Amino acid sequence: MIAPMTPQRAIDPYDWPALLALLHRAFSSMEGIIDPPSSLHSLTAEGIAEQARKGEVWVIGQPALACVFLTPRPDALYLGKLAVDPAHQGHGHARVLIEHAAQRARALGLPALELQTRVELMANHAAFRRMGFIKTAATAHPGYTRPTTLTFRRAV
């Protein structure tokens, strides 16, 4: 196993287009599997920069080979766009980012981590459960009558 690197906070100036490209590579395996399509299709480099200004964006590597968006909410730190470049998956980078998020939640005085994943992504559900997350909700995107997203939560 390759030793995971330390997460670094991405702030301006940063190569936001390269980070967007990483997200597209990491999420490409979901194409044709999840319905509705990923919100990644509407994300821009400027949108990532805005996330970094209003919340937090953390990366591993230079250039980034893994990332996570962190957004404080009243009762939890929300993890979004957790992604690892396909060429670097299986080396513990997602786990390092989640553990870093837990440290950030504690520093912010928040009791839990929360994330969402699509119903169809069974391997993600299993991975999050192995990292201590518990499914807390199933919700539907607008216009859908069936659950499309599962919410997972973990105390810190």
Image: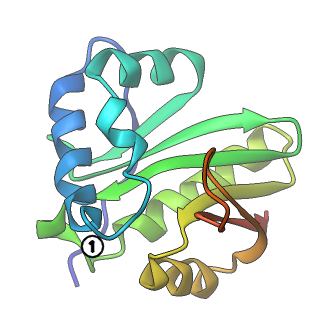
The colour scheme of the drawn protein is rainbow
Residue 46 position (above or below residue 123): above
Residue 12 percent location from the top left of the image? 34, 13
Q: Nearer the viewer, residue 72 or 93?
A: 72
Where does the C terminus fall, quadrant-wise?
A: bottom right
Residue 141 percent location from the top left of the image? 61, 50
Q: Nearer the viewer, residue 104 or 114?
A: 114
Res. 61 in view? no
Side (left or right) of 52 relative to 64? right
Where does the N terminus fall, quadrant-wise?
A: bottom left
Residue plotted at (25% across, 20% down): 14
Task: Report helix, strand or loop for mark 1.
Answer: loop
Badge 1 density bin: few <14, some 14–19, many ≥20, Cα 10 Å: few
Residue plotted at (45% across, 34% down): 57
Residue 98 percent location from the top left of the image? 54, 61
Residue 13 position (above or below residue 93): above
Residue 148 position (above or below residue 15): below
Residue 111 percent location from the top left of the image? 87, 54
Side (left or right) of 109 relative to 21? right
Residue plotted at (27% across, 80% down): 90
Residue with the mark numbered 1: 3
Side (left or right) of 59 relative to 14? right
The three-letter amino acid code for the residue at tag 1 is Ala
